[in-house]
Amino acid sequence: MELITHYDDVLYGIKTVRDFKEGYVTNFYPDKAQICLWIHLKIFFKLELTEGVVFFLKKNSDFCNFYFCSKSLESLENAISIFHNSQHIKVSVDIIGSKQMIHSIVNLMGYYDFKIIRKLTRMTRAASSFSEVADEHMTIATKTHASEIEILLYEYFDPYSEQLPLIQEIESWIKNKRVIIYSENSKVIGFI
């Protein structure tokens, strides 16, 4: 595994796969700000085991989020086979795509002992800004709320099946006024 030191290394890895112009199978849609944070924190790695496939891994406390870019499903299967036999890393993989592609990738991963932990439907929509708050218990979060929000995330969500944000990401959302908290007796009990 190679530590990624520049965002351009990520783009180049993706480009080398796309240049095959055969097909493209991925679960990786990079957000530049997020990737740059991971690079800065030295928790983002690249692994190339076969031609036409690149893996990216984001290190967490006891596992890695596993991302792939592949020129084809067949190439992905070959690379997963090599990964399975050579790497001894606990990983969590989000599988994204059409129903047919998801089915194919789930079958491929299952063959190499990957287990389904959760099936999720993800829907997100960023709000432009919050100017009004509807209730006296609701306020726009401040930086002091970041650690309470992080605690709630890890208490109520599964880090293996949800890509929980880093504290720095939460702080960035708060700085941009993208988080509303719900509190009672000066204790954060919810947020959006």
Image: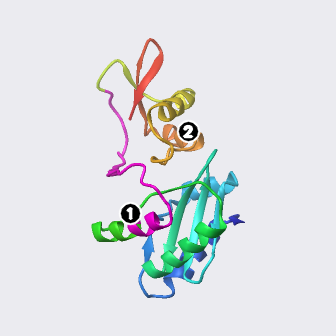
Residue at image position (33%, 67%) is 103
Q: Main secondary structure of the magenta part?
A: loop
- At a point 49% along the width and 76% down the height, the residue shown is 76
Residue 142 in view (yes/no): no
> Is residue 117 inside the magenta stretch?
yes
Q: Which residue is mark 1?
A: 96
What sort of colour scheme is used for the picture?
rainbow
Seen from the viewer's position, the closer of residues 17 and 30 is 17
Q: Is residue 175 above or below residue 30?
A: above
Location of the N terminus by quadrant is bottom right
Which stretch appears magenta? 106-133
Q: Nearer the viewer, residue 93 or 175?
A: 93
Residue 182 picture location, percent across and down:
39, 24
Q: Secondary structure at mark 1?
A: loop
What kind of element bears circle 2?
helix
Tag 1: amino acid: Ile
Question: Where does the image place residue 97, in percent across and percent down from the top left?
Answer: 35, 66
- Which image quadrant is residue 116 in? bottom left
Relative to 182, is 75 above or below? below
Marks 2 and 1: in contact by CB < 8 Å? no
Near mark 2 (Cα within 10 A), the count class, few <14, some 14-19 or many ≥20, is many
Q: Residue at image x 35%, y 34%?
A: 131
Instruction: Identify the residue under disc 2.
Output: 171
- The type of residue carrying mark 2 is Glu
| Foreground of the two, 178 or 163 | 163
